[in-house]
Amino acid sequence: MGIRNLCLLGHGGEGKTSLVESMLFVTGGTDRLGKVTDGNTVSDYDPEEIRRKISIAATPLPVEFGGHKLNVIDAPGYFDFAGEVLEGLRVADTGVIVTSAKSGVGVGAEKAWKFCKDKPKMVYVSKVDEENANFSGTYNALRDQFGVSVCPVVIPGSSGDKVNTLINIVTGKAYAVSGGKVSEVPVPADMADTVREHLATLSENVAETDEALMDKFFAEEPFTPEELRKGIRAGMLTGSVTPVFCGCATNGLGTELLLQGICDYAPAPGETGDEQTDDGKPVKQDPAGPPVLFVFKTLIDQYGKFSFFKVVSGSVTSDMTLTNSRSGASEKLAHLFVVKGKKNTEVKELKCGDIGAVSKLTDTKTGDTLHPAGAQIALKGINFPEPCYALAFAPKTKGGEEKIATGLSRMSEEDLTFTVRNDAETKQFVVTGQGDIHLDVLCQRLKGRYGVEVETEGARVAYREKIRKKVTGIEGKHKKQSGGHGQFGRVIMEFEPGDTEDLVFEEKIFGGSVPKNFHPAVEKGLRDSIPHGVLAGYPVVFLKATLVDGSYHDVDSSEMAFKLAARLAYKAGLPLGNPVLLEPVGSLKVFIPDSYMGDIIGDLNKRRGRVMGMNPDADGGQIVEAEVPIAEMNTYAIDLRSMTQGRGSFSLKFERYEETPANVQQKIIEETKRIEEDEE
């Protein structure tokens, strides 16, 4: 049985899940045709997927057709779940880009094409039978945008709104659907010229795959169906042919034609070349080789932990023991499964190129390689997108902090596209993910799986404070008499801007007015004070403090008294030193198509950003480089997506602290005071 591994890609709502549901139904893999709107499809079974009516996870689904096993991975279309797309593509040999005849070629198709730039790909145009569908317009847009490699294989049998016939350009046969059954019919007479035009386009692409076919093409001899099949298959491997199919998943029209096309044209595992290790060495996908697995996805449910893998070399059997290349741990593959949605079927063996799952691995994560002991093979991992949208999570009821931390820790084994940090400065539990939908899904899963309800708020910015001028003669005196020994300590301090971020403490005492044994206590009092600035309570940096004078009492002076005296001097002196807030500034790179340049630069100016330059991107777009206050970037992930219809992306890294403009500083101080009052 031949194997084909493919990943369905495209924007949300274009029909990927409905297509794979149709594939399962027409091949007998399911006994009913589920619908996304009804929440009963095989691939969207997670409670959040059912509630939202979108795919959230990449779901592998085995489909058997024509003596082949097709491992179809239904990937999410919403950009917040791009990590799942990358997991599916990592083990797929072919990308199937799904776009709708109603909506045409949108940003989802553009991104899918970029994802598949180094992979064989085909296009499926969905919903051709629906009102206002326009296959011709969609096909022409595909060809205009992605080039002449795009060529038709299956087209609608009419140009009207009600399409119920499809024509296979390769075989010249037509098919219609009636009463849920697809049968062969004559090619409509009014489509003869259209079929000839598309056959000429396909033949021209196929001719470029072989010199003998090129000679035949120039001699104007027609290609046989077998020559066309051979040429399409060869062209997919080189990227010179991207076949276009179409159909309607709800009635099954076109589904078998796509399945046959996948069997005929899509490469088998190993035909696209060797796998690569982390250091660039080739690993042959050899059925007779040693058993090597790549773990591309982890799932944790009520039954435990499932690790999804592709057999890259050899074959694996249950009870086999392999070594994890990352940790060196031995892992026993006690139970192997083929997974179809939430249904697990245990198997004894999985062969080279196949996809399966194993339960209860103790020390294996997504991206790990398992191999025989001593082999030392670490396959190239998955480059997940950097998290870019942050919110602070807090439990609605007291005592839920530990549940949130535990739940997110478990979920981070499944989802490597979010990060968690407990910010001691802002006293917030900050979760950074791919967007607002992504973080909302995490909140809902915390509630559903771990029983903790979460409130969210914006992640606060960690500001700093510093003084800008030198102040002298600042007294701090602590005196207390309450019977018995009293407390006495008096210091005279100078405060000035320092050269290093950390506190610099010096002493210039003459005549022993403050004995040396109390100097460390003065420094300790200052170090205890600098985490709390005098403007808005943020840590003070770049401060130099000099002890110049003071006095002590033989009996009543103590280390504690001088610590408190130093604190009083700090509180008295810093407000006189022209204090200012410092805000973190980040180095920003925005990746956009040329057409959005003006909007992006205008928006960065509104965010108090400084554009440093523009450079061409390898993908044909532009990279805008800027420095921008991080406080202005809280919602940038969502705003950029809106401004560019999802085509833009960015990276932001902390660069340094800079003085905050006076008008902005006052707003920050007022907001900080408001937050403190609310917390009290």
Image: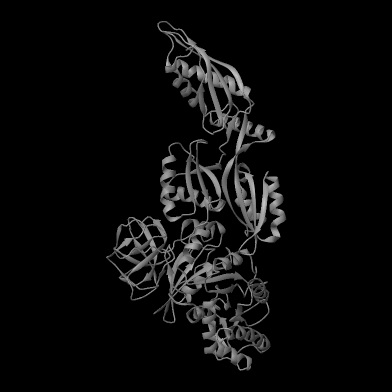
Q: Residue furthest front?
A: 510
Q: Residue furthest top?
A: 483
**Does residue 171 appear in the picture of this structure?**
no
What residue is shown at x 69% (from left), y 34% (from top)?
663
Across and down, in percent, residue 128 comes to 62, 75
- Nearer to us in this view, 11 or 613: 613
Across and down, in percent, residue 509 comes to 50, 16
Looking at the image, residue 124 lies above or below residue 457: below
What residue is shown at x 39% (from left), y 57% (from top)?
365
What residue is shown at x 31% (from left), y 57% (from top)?
329
Tag count in the figure?
A: 0
Across and down, in percent, residue 546 comes to 54, 22
Residue 117 is drawn in which quadrant? Answer: bottom right
- Nearer to us in this view, 127 or 415: 415
> Which coloring applies here?
one colour
Left or right of 180, for residue 450: left
Left or right of 191, for residue 317: left
Across and down, in percent, residue 623 comes to 64, 57
Looking at the image, residue 339 lies above or below residue 642: below
Quadrant in which the N terminus appears: bottom left
**Does residue 138 appear in the picture of this structure?**
yes
Left or right of 58, for residue 616: right
Residue 668 is drawn in which quadrant? Answer: top right
